Each structure stands twice: as C-alpha cells, then as structure tokens.
Amino acid sequence: MIDLYTAATPNGHKVSIALEELGLPYTLQVLKLSEGEQKLPGFLAINPNGRIPAIVDHAADGFAVFESGACLVYLAEKTGQLMPTDVKGRSRVMQWLMFQMGGVGPMMGQANVFFRYFPVKIPAAIERYQGECKRLFRVLDGHLAQHEFLAGDYSIADIANWAWVRTHRWSGVDIDDLPHLKRWRDAIRARPAVQRGIERPASTMDLSRDGDTAAQRFAEDARRLMETGQSLKAGGDQA
C-alpha cells in the first residue's frame, strides 16, 4: 500500500494519475495547504521541503519519496510501466519529464503568480511568463506534430506535462492555434485513469477555465497569502 500526500494541484494530480494508470493500491492523505499542514512536523519527516506531493511505500519498508518527478520515476521503475527500461527509451522519457519540471511547471507557476495572484499587476512580468509558457507550448506542439505521445508510448512524461498544460487558461495562455497540443491534451483527458486521477482529490475550482466562482475566491485567498509573505503557486501547488 502507498500513502499519497497531496492536494488538488497540477503536481499533486501527476502522482494520482500515475497511481491510477498503474493500478496500484493507495490511500489519499489530502493536506490543507492554506492552513499550512504541509509544514507540520509529521509531514516534514516525509518531505523536509514541506511541499506536496510525496508518497510513502509501505511495501518497501515505508520508503518515502518527495518531488513529483521523483515520485513518477519511482512508481514507473517499481512497476516496470510508463517508462521503457532500455537506455535510450528511458532517456527520452526523462528528457520530456525534465522539460516539464524545469520549464513548463515553473513558467506556468510564475505566470499564475503575476497574472492571478500578485496584488499589483506588473505587465512586463505577466508578458514575460505568459510568453515563455507559449514558447514551451509551441515546442510541445511541434514535437507532437510528428509523435502521438512525447516519448514513444504513453508515459510519465505525458502525465507530467498534461497535468500542467490542462490548466493553461488559468495562466492566461491560449492554445487554440496549437492543434497538435490540443489533440494530445484531449486524447489524454479521455483516458479513464486520468479522469479518476484528477478527482483524487477533486478540486473545488476549475483551473481550466475563467469565470469559476471558486477559482476567483482562491485567487483572492492567494493574494492575501502573498501579502503576508507566504508562497503559493498554481492552484496552491507545492513542488
């Protein structure tokens, strides 16, 4: 049995989607980020960085893994699924996973901060991060023009990137002119395990569209948190 410490965020949903795809039994431990539960001593013993998601694998003597990308790699290697075992195939998956971890996630997170949460609008910052998001989306679109998935067969690389790309409207970035990215987004969204994964846990707001009342309340709460010096990224995302 695996314990998944998580919240309804892009990074959290990466791991719940992977667990659903792999059919591994797990328990959901949902942390209330706005109340600082991720900074309590019990969770810090699992992830010293105090961010979600993290997993504890009781079948491996309670082995703990933090950082969403590390969780995905661990689960793929544990099961021998969602990532090839040959050197080149594994490398292809890792390249696109790192593309998300080092690019898509951080850039969308910063776009969210300046576009949605920051109490003072700074047009140059908004343009900078939205522009970088769009550039990264174009990279994905160009690659997907020649490939069904990012790294051969469907893999943890697709899961990681999809969990963020699906929230592009929350970052204020349109993808209507990126047909291959849209095709890939919709194909992954249709997978039953993905549909289950984004409900584990379910979000109280819809990050995929504007005008959602709960999302507006979240943005207001996020602004207040920023004013008090606390950090908050996409959808309350941590790590």
Image (cartoon, rainbow, N blue to C red):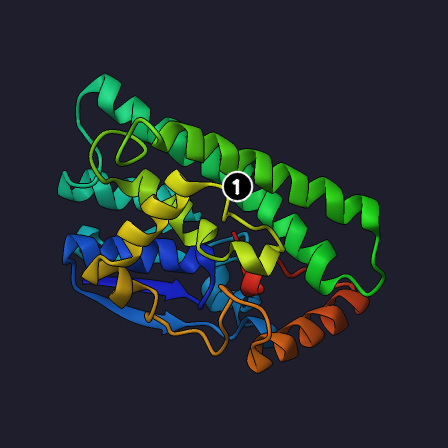
Place of residue 44 in the rendered image (x, y in percent of width and height, measured from the top left): 50, 60
Above-or-below relation of 229 to 90 = below
Is residue 121 found left or right of 109 in the rendered image? right
User: Which residue is at 25% across, 17% downward?
Assistant: 88
63 relative position to 239: left or right = left
> Does residue 174 appear in this view?
yes
Q: Quadrant of the N terminus?
A: bottom left
Q: Position of residue 73 (x, y in %)?
A: 30, 39
Along the line of sight, which residue is nearer the eye, 202 or 70?
202
Q: What residue sits right under mark 1 in the picture?
A: 104
Q: Nearer the viewer, residue 222 or 43?
A: 222
Nearest the eye: 29 or 61: 29
Q: Secondary structure at mark 1?
A: helix
Please state the total of marks drawn on the protein image. 1
Q: Position of residue 144 (x, y in %)?
A: 35, 33
Identified by mark 1, the residue type is Val
Q: Is residue 10 left or right of residue 111?
A: left
| Residue closest to the eye, 225 or 104 | 104
Classify mark 1: residues with Cα within 10 Å, few (<14), some (14-19) or many (20+). many
Q: Residue at point 66% right, 45% down? A: 130
**183 relative to 51, above or below:** above
Residue 122, above or below 79: below
Q: Residue furthest top?
A: 88
**Residue at horizontal 31 percent and vertical 71 percent from the top:** 28
Task: Please say whether residue 46 is visible from this viewpoint.
Answer: no
The percent position of residue 234, horizontal first and vertical second, equals 57, 59
